[in-house]
Amino acid sequence: MEETIIKRHGLTSGLFMLAVVLVVAITGSYVVRAMVDYRNIPDFYPREITVSAEGKVSIVPDIVLLNFGVTTDGVDVPTIVGQNASKMNAIINMLKVTENIDAKDITTTQYSLEPRYEYAQKTGVRTFKGYTMSQQVAVKVRDFTKIGDVLNQATALGSNLVGNLQFAIDDTEKATQQARDKAIENAKAKAQSMADAAGMKLGKIVNIQDSSYPYYGGGLYEKSMDTANGLGVAAPAPQIESGQTEVTANIYITYRIK
């Protein structure tokens, strides 16, 4: 009887040990497989660093934008249209022939004929006073030595509106690219400095973003010259200085870090 119990006990112990071994083996297999699978999981949250930098370049403007206009008041439409056209045509002819400005650099920006009224403050009644004929052109001058003469001759020929003198850059994309290159250079140097300070190493660039605004030019150099004598009398040509204009670009660069 005792021998039977001992045998059963030994058998039970053996089965238990076998079960334990199988559980450990299966568990180990799952652990190994899980580790392998974990290593093969894509790195959805990689370690990265993003830096921003600004690049600036100072450019000497290569064009100046001018606006010339002639405004004529009167009652008889054919008369004021003819007078206005005569003065404006003389100005345009001067720009093309005398100053050798290309026709593609002269653009008509306004041509209008509108009635004029005079309002009586006490009665609120408006009285017809005639018409106002207005024509304006925008001119792009590439030779800065001509600016003073162009302004002087235009007013002498009857232009009674000269305004919005703006210095600008003709090839804006080239200027912006120079600023962008400078911004990228500054961003790389900034990222390297931050990585060195933190004891990390920079990996590859995974993203780059340009957040620069388009450069339109001339805004910083706008000069109002809305009052001209318009008397047809030549005056000393004004001296106009272009100075420099600053083009700015902003860049964001994202690096993997090790």
Image (cartoon, grey):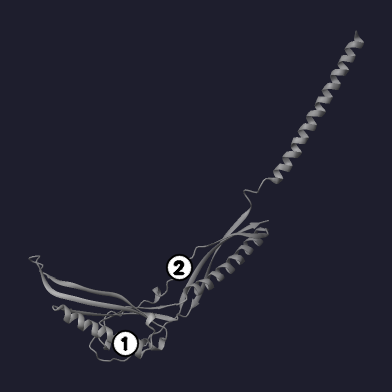
Say whether residue 38 is left or right of residue 22. Answer: left
Report the residue marked by disc 1.
93
Say whether residue 241 is left or right of residue 58. Answer: left
Q: Give the image location of residue 258, x and y in percent.
A: 68, 56
**Residue 257 in view of the camera:** yes
Q: Quadrant of residue 51?
A: bottom right
Asked whether 50 or 163 is in front, the reply is 163
- Kindly identify the residue that appears in the image at 50 percent across and 68 percent down: 249
- Kindly identify the residue that appears in the image at 14 percent across and 79 percent down: 76
Report the residue marked by disc 2.
214
Say whether residue 229 is left or right of residue 247. Answer: left
Q: Quadrant of residue 214?
A: bottom left
Give the farthest residue toward the top. Answer: 1
Residue 71, placed above or below residue 9: below
Looking at numbered disc 2 in the image, what kind of residue is underneath it? Pro
Q: Give the image location of residue 184, x and y in percent.
A: 57, 67
The disc, 2 or 1, on the residue closer to the chain's N-terminal end is: 1
Asked whether 112 or 19 is in front, the reply is 112
What element does badge 2 sit on?
Answer: loop
- Kindly identify the residue that appears in the image at 56 percent across and 70 percent down: 181
Give the farthest residue toward the left. Answer: 123
**Residue 228 in view of the camera:** no
Looking at numbered disc 1 in the image, what kind of residue is underneath it? Asn
Q: Are marks 2 and 1 in contact (CB under 8 Å)?
A: no
Q: How many marks?
A: 2
- Kindly identify the residue that appears in the image at 26 percent across and 88 percent down: 157
Q: CA distance from mark 2 to mark 1?
A: 34 Å
Residue count near mark 1 (Cα–Cα under 10 Å), binned few <14, some 14–19, many ≥20 = some
Q: Give the image location of residue 203, x and y in percent.
A: 66, 59
Q: Give the image location of residue 38, x and y in percent.
A: 70, 43
Residue count near mark 2 (Cα–Cα under 10 Å), binned few <14, some 14–19, many ≥20 = few
